[in-house]
Amino acid sequence: MKLSDKKAILSFSDGSKPVEFPIYDGTVGPQVIDIRKLYGQTGMFTYDPGFLSTAACASAITYIDGDKGEVLYRGYPIEQLAVNCDFMDICYLILNGDIPDLAQKKEFDTLVSHHTMVHEQMQFFLRGFRRDAHPMAVLTGLVGALAAFYHDSTDITNPHHRHVSAIRLIAKMPTLVAMAYKYSQGQPFMYPDNSLSYTGNFLRMMFANPCEPYVVNPVVERALDRIFILHADHEQNASTSTVRLCGSSGTNPFAAMAAGVACLWGPAHGGANEACLQMLEQLQADGGLAKVGHFMEQVKDKNSGVRLMGFGHRVYKNYDPRAKLMQQTCKEVLAALGLENDPLFKLAMEVERIALEDPYFVERKLYPNVDFYSGIVQRAIGVPTALFTAIFALARTVGWIAQWNEMISDPEYKIGRPRQLFEGPTTRQVPVRK
């Protein structure tokens, strides 16, 4: 952080002495007022539900400009990364700060691929779940359980342990997600194949069976890899903040990641693409293209209870750049699989067209977000709707572990302890019952 020449002065209407606070400059983005001494100097807290105006940490990983519709991983525009890099490049970049050269990439790919297997006893742990359990319930348990199997790398004060944990989590998450899926289907688990790419290996573990060879479709592989890239990190969102807050207590990284998975499960966060696809499927059942206009009118009626999923974002006040990439990816996948006339994709295009032309949506800057198209892509690939959020967790793992490691490495980090504005009863005496 760079100290600004400016200072913030807090004045009071009752004549109390004004208080000065330092202001810091980031490399890009808004300046921040350092209020760490606010309580000590004034006896007051700030009130900011949802942390809409509060920077809880300093980070050098991801930058988002919602007004411009810009996402940067370590300074690189996400549009360029999604076209020119694969997911392993992005993992290396997010963890280490720069895109790997050829030698670094080969070494990193090999390192990750040699950690893809999980302890054999994880299978017995998995079998304790009902087969119809939601994949996110299963994944939360599996990720947390890693600490019981890999406790040789849980010393968070040791940088080598943190690095080993990061590699293990990135490498094993596809295996765990695929195991959860296979278990729900009553199919045998497929062990990792280190000769395949990270994403190709995941597709094989998901959709292959021991009875016949499986050939990875390169278009599908690239599409899923792009989904991973677009979801790898997204600054201080709810699940990332959860990982940081959980990790600030000094707990092991696997427990912190499990907390992130649990937070991501929420429909307002990682479950949004699942909700979006369910919306399109319901619209198709209610009449399809012929009913889109009526549906969009219902959305504008606050009393109808009808919600438009996949549009708008807490941060973006412009077109989500990830949505543009996902729309193109969606077209490529549907063409490659012979699904150009997919009714849900046509519905999605018509919903988007109306939203981008109707003044109601334009004035409110309700543009499509990345969830709007990613569900259609995953559906075309063959991923069941209930597994969408688990795929999201798989991709976001690298962001979570990088953010956690950044926090642990910060000499100024402290256990998170938000304050409150108390509105309950004041001190009162317990009545004596006779």
Image (cartoon, rainbow, N blue to C red):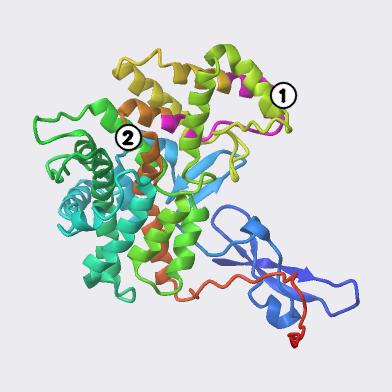
Residue that appears at 31% across and 39% down: 85
Which residue in the structure is indicated by mark 1?
359
| Amino acid marked by disc 2 | Leu
Q: How far separated are the C-alphas under marks 2 and 1?
A: 34 Å
**Front position in the image: 189 or 31:** 189
- Magenta stretch: give its range: 353-375
Q: Is residue 371 above or below residue 342?
A: below
Residue 268 vs residue 120: left or right? right
Residue that appears at 56% across and 59% down: 26
Quarter in which the N terminus is drawn? bottom right
Which corner quadrant of the image does residue 328 belong to? top left
Which corner quadrant of the image does residue 124 belong to? bottom left
Which residue in the structure is indicated by mark 2?
224
**Front position in the image: 280 or 232:** 280
> Is residue 354 a member of the stretch shown in magenta?
yes
Quarter in which the C terminus is drawn? bottom right
